[in-house]
Image: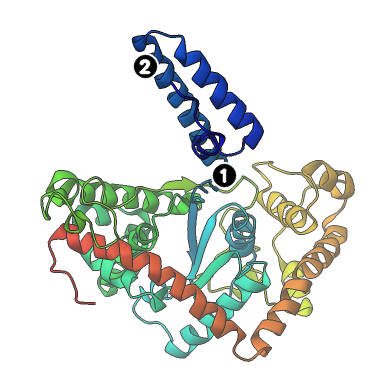
Amino acid sequence: LALAPPRAAVAVAPRGVAASTRCATTMTCSAARRHLPSPSRRAFASRATASASAEAAAETAAEAPAKTERRKRVLSGVQPTGSIHLGNYFGAIKNWVDLQEEFDAFYCVVDLHAITPGNHDAAALKASTRSSAAIYLAAGLDPEKSNVFVQSHVAAHSELCWLLNCATPIGWLEKMIQFKEKARKAGEDVSVGLLDYPVLMAADILLYNADVVPVGEDQRQHLELTRDVAARVNNLYGGNKWKKLGPKKGDGARAPSGRFRGGDVLKVPEAYIPKAGARVMSLTDGTSKMSKSNPAEGSRINVLDSPDEIAKKIKRCKTDAFEGLEFRNPDRPEATNLLTMYQLCTELSEEEVIAACGDMRWGDFKPALTEAVIEHLRPIQSRYDEIVSEEGYLDGVLKRGADAANEVAEKTVADVRDAMGFLPRSA
């Protein structure tokens, strides 16, 4: 065999090796091949080719950009009924601020849920929707890290709710504890919306393929229903049933979202229960959670309450006749609640709270609690004032959030329509 010229040797050598080294290596290999029998020469050439291919593949892999995995997605929201209070803030919104660093976050003002009783004040709904969104941002949600939007600005919520309604047995809804409790109070005036509230909540969650959903214990049953509804839709319309609706190959085999038909139509989410201790109870009853629906304004501290209003509510809040203060004594729910509130506002540990306040009387502790709450809320209230006074800022944030939400939600509801047999919509 003739020796390959240096130019040819350089042309076939792997990249990343010095030219002189590549040439010398090729010539040495060629000389060695001349002294081998024909089968051995073929085996030698095969091994050399495989080695060169492996080196080239390794180099190409090293040069290729690393694939980034999609961050897990989180979804949550708060109703814009009344004013957002400390229970909403510590139980939900403050947790969202931490979650936005780790998850692909979607947070909405759930205004559709606010009308479920059927007798809402239209002007108040409009005002509280804007106020709630502004509080989200003032509390620390960053529009660069979270998608903040209004639920009704994404039409897919209502559409998917109807599609899920038609797959959900009414018996499942009639078993919901919150519906049974509220239906007893409302009697014959109970609205269909109150019965259907959990299905709308299921649509909210399922639209965004959420991996985790922050919920309180009182919403755990609704999340379990969401999982059941998703599983039922997947069983009725997913898998091979969905796959057979289109051709087996080519673009026609893909669902509207771009993925191939078959498998689950909807993603089944997991619950995220916030860490213990973030539950703030009523100021008038330490065994009941702080609530917007409580007619007693003195039962809650709103995020936007003035210092005077906060001082007045804490001064009048329910306490007990025991000496000293302590956590988790079942006979002293108010002590646990007010100490928890102080701990959350000061960000101290339980041990530090007890060291500072354990020997106090209520007359000494209430002013300390008042100061802690006022100081914790002061920067939030200041940022809130800036947000609502900056013309166009809030609307811009909500529009960008709704655009991002629509992009995800429309793909999900389009796949559900496709799996259920609806004709595709023209572009």
Query: Residue 42 has which mark?
Result: 2
Q: Nearer the viewer, residue 41 or 379?
A: 41
Question: Dot 2 surroundings within 10 Å: few (below 14), some, or many (20 or more)?
Answer: few
Task: Return the x and y of residue 123 as percentages of the image width and height.
Answer: 47, 90
Q: Earlier in the sequence, mark 2 or mark 1?
A: 2
| Front one among 68 and 199 | 68
From the viewer's perspective, is residue 286 above or below residue 327?
A: below
The residue that disc 1 covers is 63
* Quadrant of the image occupied by residue 341: bottom right
The image shows residue 29 at horizontal and vertical percentages of 52, 20
- Please name the colour scheme applied to the rendered image: rainbow
Residue nearest the viewer, comparing 66 with 367: 66
Q: Which element type, helix, strand or loop, lies under badge 2?
A: helix
Q: For numbered disc 1, what is the local secondary structure?
A: helix
* Mark 1, other Cα within 10 Å: few <14 / some 14–19 / many ≥20: few
**Relative to the observer, which residue lies in front, 176 or 157?**
157
Amino acid type indicated by mark 1:
Glu
Three-letter amino acid code at disc 2? Arg
